[in-house]
Image (cartoon, rainbow, N blue to C red):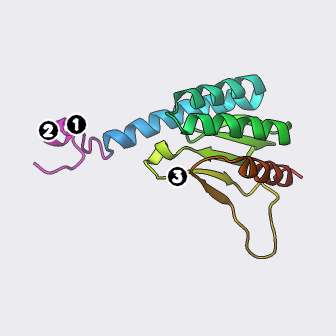
Amino acid sequence: MSEKSTTRGPAAARGGKVGGFTAGERAAMKERARELKAEARANRDREAGERDVLAKIAEMPEPDRSMAERLHAIVKANAPDLWPKTWYGMPAYAKDGKVVCFFKPASKFGSRYATFGFEEAANLDDGSMWPTSFALTELTPSDERKIGRLVKKAVS
């Protein structure tokens, strides 16, 4: 039996494609639907967004969790006007509903490093080329200061 759009058979039993989507794809779509509801709440209620971000951070394995906790504190200290929210299952911080910066834990995609990144709403333009994300294997005091400066610039 081929792995076409079926709801039964070997593909479904192996976690393969069912109805055109793999089990992982269906789980991601359900997660995104939950997140869109949470995002709507967060856009109306800053505290709801904060709770959602802290809950996502609490779910992370170490060392991602400790790094995310520090980054959350850095963003809050350097850009208190940004609203915390989840974005594709990651902690993010928005201004006027647009994501400015986010943290992608290494565990999310099995990467060897976590990422702290900036989106288009960040005011980091510097000539015709500038970095928009940074790989993190740990957070040193120097890294924390640099990130704090970048976050301040991003919301300026």
Q: Secondary structure at mark 3?
A: loop
Residue topped by disc 1? 7
Mark 2 — residue? 9
Range of residues picked out in magenta: 1-20
Return the residue found at the far left.
Answer: 1
Between tags 2 and 3, which lies in front? 3
| Mark linked to residue 113 | 3
User: For the residue labelled by badge 1, is the local secondary structure a helix, a strand or a loop?
Assistant: loop
On screen, residue 129 above or below 5: below
Secondary structure category for the residue under label 2 = loop
Q: Residues within 10 Å of mark 3 (few under 14, many from 20)?
A: some
The image shows residue 28 at horizontal and vertical percentages of 44, 39
Give the Cα distance between marks 2 and 3: 38 Å
Identify residue type, mark 2: Gly
Q: Is residue 77 left or right of residue 14?
A: right
**Marked residue nearer the N-terminal end (2 or 3):** 2
Disc 2: CA contacts within 10 A as few (<14), some (14-19) or many (>=20): few
The amino acid sitting under disc 1 is Thr
